[in-house]
Image (cartoon, rainbow, N blue to C red):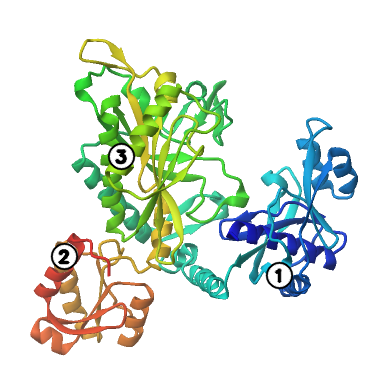
Amino acid sequence: MDLETLRHSTSHILAAAVKNLYPEVKFGIGPAIENGFYYDFGGLKISDDDLPQIEKEMQKIISTKLPFVRKEISVGEGRNLFKDQKYKLELINELAADNNLRFTIYELNGFVDLCKGPHVKNTSAIKTFKLTHIAGAYWKGDEKNPMLTRIYGTAFLTQKELNHYLWQQEEAKKRDHRKIGKELKLFSFHDEAAGEAFFHPKGWIVFNILVDFWREVHQKNGYQEIRTPVLLNAELWKRSGHYQMKYPMYYTEIEGIEWGIKPMNCPGGMLIYNEEIHSYKELPLRVGELGLVHRHELSGVLHGLMRVREFTQDDAHIYCTPEQLKDELKNIIKLCDEIYSVFGLPYHIEFSTRPEKSVGTDEAWQLSEKLMQEVLNEEKIDFKLNPGDGAFYGPKFDFHLEDSLGRTWQCGTIQVDFNLPERFDLTYIDEEGQKKRPVMIHRTIYGSLERFIGILTEHFAGAFPVWLSPVQVVVIPIAERHTGYAKKIELRMRNEGIRVEVDERDETMQAKIRDAQLQKIPYMLIVGDKEEKAKTVSERGRSGKDYGQIKIEEFIANIKKEIEDKIIN
């Protein structure tokens, strides 16, 4: 029995329990999802406090070992069966192109659901489950539709797996980047700019360190950097196809002309490419852009830095010949590996191939997929294959990063594009003087800098490695008379490029140490009479470990080495 079947079956038991407790409820849908399941209900007014009662009713159903009974019905039978269930009736009417269509339903002790299955044989197969929380959700995800009550839950094959998941969820709450960001004064969120982050001085330091690291690595790997405008004429977005696809963009009108705020960087980059004639000798041409983009996300899906309307995408586009494609893919994978390893983030790659709806010739798709498969084989990379899940314009690699809690986050992506080079008539001159179409590769590594910072904040629980920490050292004078010595140490460290502060507050040394630990500052240097006389400091780590006295020169050398090597501690 697989988890998806188990969880889907549990969602039906949830719905049956809700029907027993609240007979007038209207049923939406109840799928299995990545970490569990949910079910949407109309006309249900409950809170998290009601979940234990629903769980108790679910346990009662499970204990009776009821079977899941599958039946096929006609459109007419379905309309009659669900005549009092408006959401189910709406689904039937949408799917019923003709009256000859037949549906499958599953019955569970009087509860009937429109469902293709599969399900477990009977309810006794459900051993461990937990309802986790309640949320609001628009019917079909459309804010114009009614708001339903969504009950989330999870189910596992064993109690041990469930306990681990619940621990993971509790730990995730403690590590919530929104909570830590506020406590450490990194960033904040305000209703005046929903879906957009306000970076405070300390958070902006982290942001810029990531930018500097990105630039350093990319310059070393032969990338040029450009900048393109945020606001572009709507005709450009019609040319790229985003306008016709109703991509979630923001539009405005200026002097009677429609303009779009860019949701991605590629079209602007291609205008730069077409500014001049390119020779095969220039290729591969690697062009990066840290572009500020905007996407019109619904308010219900916004979540801190993880899902925003405004973000900085670490984009790059590679223009190459077909013969160069394979080597360029290998180079990008190595670049991703180099960057992710610095943060201690293991990853796996998913390879997605041609979807049903796509552009480009069969020959181009077959060649690209063949070369991408060869890259994975030659580099001995384990991967997950997602048949038919590629972009409509080409196959892709996605990088899924694993954090310290075992959660995965899709960040980097490498996509081969057949669509835009045609739409924008991109060319280069080959060895024989003929115009040829370059292969275009889209790729990101962080994905979004804002989201990557959110991931790192939770991964490190706010205790960033020294090289990333907004404040790397705090000097704590024991008494007011030691402040002068502390200031001298501060100046010396600043001159060495170390981010350092002196805690001059009229507080006890113990209070200052405790506050520095709460702020996740990597090192505390305590100075008093003994240290000033010996020209030393007493070193402490944020974990509470006391390293004892150390010469200032030695401490500076040690921390600079730690910063330079980007040590994760």
Along the horizontal axis of the image, is 250 left or right of 132?
A: left
User: Closer to the camera, 62 or 176?
Assistant: 62
Question: Which residue sits furthest top?
Answer: 433
In the depicted structure, whether residue 448 falls above or below residue 434: below
Q: Nearer the viewer, mark 2 or mark 1?
A: 1
Say if residue 316 shows up in the picture: no
User: Which quarter of the rendering shows the C terminus?
Assistant: bottom left
The answer to which of marks 1 and 3 sits earlier in the sequence is 1
Say if residue 52 shows up in the picture: yes
x and y percentages locating residue 288 in the rendered image: 31, 37
Under circle 2, the secondary element is: helix
The answer to which of marks 2 and 3 sits earlier in the sequence is 3
Q: Which mark is residue 375?
A: 3
Q: Amino acid at mark 1?
A: Ser
Under circle 1, the secondary element is: helix
Q: Which mark is residue 124?
A: 1
Q: Amino acid at mark 2?
A: Lys
In the depicted structure, whether residue 163 falls above or below residue 352: below
Q: Residue under circle 2? A: 560
x and y percentages locating residue 231 in the rendered image: 46, 31
Under circle 3, the secondary element is: helix
Instruction: Tell me the CA gap for discs 2 and 1.
Output: 60 Å
Q: Nearer the viewer, mark 1 or mark 3?
A: 1
User: Which quarter of the rendering shows the N terminus?
Assistant: bottom right
Along the horizontal axis of the image, is 424 left or right of 468?
A: right
Within-10-Å neighbours for mark 2: few <14, some 14–19, many 20+: some
Residue beneath the point at 27% across and 57% down:
342
Within-10-Å neighbours for mark 1: few <14, some 14–19, many 20+: some
Q: Quadrant of residue 352?
A: top left
